[in-house]
Amino acid sequence: MTPPPVEKSITIAAGPDAAFRRFTTEIATWWPLRTHSVGQADAERWVFEERVGGRIYEVIRGGRESVWGIVTAWEPPRRVAFTWYPDRTPETAQQVVEVRFVPQGERTRVELTHSGWERYGAQARRAHRGYRLGWAYVLRLYAGRRLSPLVLALDAVMWVALRLAPRGRQAPSTSEAG
């Protein structure tokens, strides 16, 4: 049985323009590269190209790039969507992440939907479980809620997992841990 889409939301104290910009253009200021990246300790920064067809990628020490997805919808400040394939090849870009920015007075409700699990393959259930936790974690960081018990606990778990990963094998990336 195929896992359902992962759906997460969070409300932030900013209008849709600022919320959209923070999620896209400013992703490098809040995304947890230390724990959620392909390059891990060698990851230097994130880039989110602001257009349909734009790449979402991390820059790894030495100038290498790891593309995570391609922007499929760019509708500031209402919606952005992109394929999602961190640490895999573009041919496996079966997953889609859609983020909507819904105004609520002076605040914005950010609604994220991660779908396409039926095309993920044998690891769909395991990855789905990881992304449910992972998206909750990164959305709290996005909202600036770094000191919440959830963020602190997940950060600790990821720190331990990085140190326990066998040498020669990458620690969990967002492809497994959200």
Image (cartoon, grey):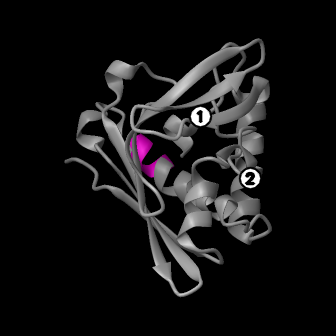
Residue extending farthest to the bottom is: 105
How crowded is the residue under tag 1: few (<14 C-alpha within 10 Å), some, or many (20+)? Answer: many
**Residue 157 percent location from the top left of the image:** 71, 49
In the foreground, 175 or 45? 45
Q: Is residue 133 left or right of residue 156?
A: left
Residue 83 or residue 86, whichever sits in front: 83
- Number of marks: 2
Mark 2: amino acid: Asp
The relative height of residue 49 versus residue 128 in the rendered view (above or below) is above
Left or right position of 165 against 92: right
Q: In which quarter of the image is residue 85?
A: top left
Give the camera-side residue of 38 and 157: 38
Report the magenta stretch's main SS.
helix
What are the residue bounds of the magenta stretch?
126-130
Q: Read off the residue under disc 1.
A: 173
Measuring from the top left, give residue 86's x and y in whole percent: 50, 30
**Disc 2/disc 1 C-alpha distance (Å):** 13 Å
Identify the residue at horizontal 41%, vertical 42% (top origin): 126
Q: Name the residue under label 2.
A: 155
Report crowding for label 2: few under 14, some 14 to 19, many 20 or more residues within 10 A (C-alpha): some
N-term mark: 2 or 1: 2
Residue drawn 43% across the image and 41% down it? 127
Q: What residue type is labelled 1?
A: Ser
Kindly identify which numbered label has been placed on residue 5. none
Point 47% across, 56% down: residue: 132
Q: What element carries label 1?
A: loop
